[in-house]
Amino acid sequence: SYELTQPPSVSVSPGQTVSITCSGPKLGDNYACWYQQKPGQSPVLIIYQDDKRPSGIPEQFSGSKSGNTATLTISGTQVMDEADYYCQAWATKVFGGGTKLTVL
Amino acid sequence: EVQLVESGGDLVQPGGSLRLSCAASRFTFNGYWMNWVRQAPGKGLEWVANIKNDGSDKHYVDSVRGRFTISRDNAKNSLYLQMNSLRAEDTAVYYCAREVSGGIDIWGQGTMVTVSS
């Protein structure tokens, strides 16, 4: 079955920049999107079609893709950005396992 | 505000059935593909199924194909998920979600399904 691999956790200091990767075979042929999910809340779309931000999503969130690896970058990270982040390969609808971001 | 509200989650025994509903409001429901996504307790997101605007095309994750059926009633602005032959591993919060090109942009609050004897 198709799988997307994300690091289980990453940590960052407030104000710094952090990147979360998402890798999978043929991801280069797929659009990737990213979701943010805070505890007890529904997911929120923050990046779609590899690098586009929906209306209302701050510019601190950016996406990119190179080959079979998509990357979510959060600049000027704040405590409120602590959440789980999930990538998704759009053509297959498969989600990555999620990455827990800790800001400390 | 665009809204999706799920209902129908419950405690059900293994092998049982359950029907989830999702009421959509404040957008043109028949203009969008719709999805069900689930999340087991403490686990990640898993896409379950989606259905085309007019209901003519449906897709399922392998683990539910043949047991679950997604459907919609555009006259009622409603999405459904009929779940049969339920297993313990189907225990999860089930989200109704709207897709746009390249992502799922609107999510409901979720409804909990627990499969246990």
Image (spheres, rainbow, N blue to C red):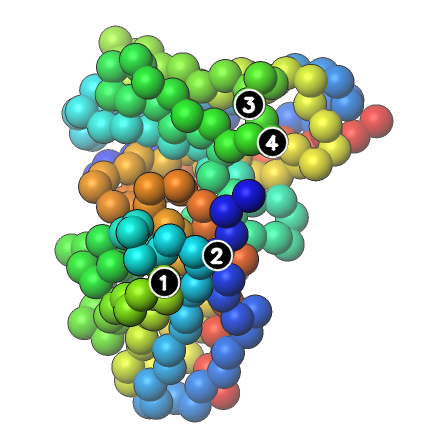
Residue at 65% in and 48% down: B41
According to the picture, the residue beneath numbered tag 1 turns out to be A68
Q: Marks 3 and 2, how far apart in space? A: 21 Å
Same chain check for tags 3 and 2:
no
Q: Which disc number belongs to residue B65?
A: 3
- Amino acid carrying label 3: it is Arg
Mark 1 lies on a secondary structure that is loop
Which of labels 1 and 4 is toward the front?
Answer: 1
State yes or no: discs 4 and 3 in contact (Cβ < 8 Å).
Answer: yes
Q: Residues within 10 Å of mark 2 (few under 14, many from 20)?
A: many
Task: Give the x, y percent position of residue A80.
Answer: 39, 73
Between A65 and B6, the residue placed more toward the observer is: A65
- Amino acid carrying label 2: it is Leu
- Disc 1 sits on a residue from what chain? A
Left or right, residue B60 beside residue B107 = right
Between A7 and B19, the residue placed more toward the observer is: A7
**Above or below: residue A85 compared with residue B5:** below
Q: Residues within 10 Å of mark 1 (few under 14, many from 20)?
A: some
Q: Marks 1 and 3, how far apart in space? A: 28 Å
Q: Which disc number belongs to residue A4?
A: 2
Mark 3 lies on a secondary structure that is loop
Going from the N terminus, do you reach mark 2 or mark 1 first?
Answer: 2
Left or right, residue A38 beside residue B83 = left
Task: Give the x, y percent position of residue A93.
Answer: 40, 42
Q: Residues within 10 Å of mark 3 (few under 14, many from 20)?
A: few
- Amino acid carrying label 1: it is Asn
According to the picture, the residue beneath numbered tag 4 turns out to be B63
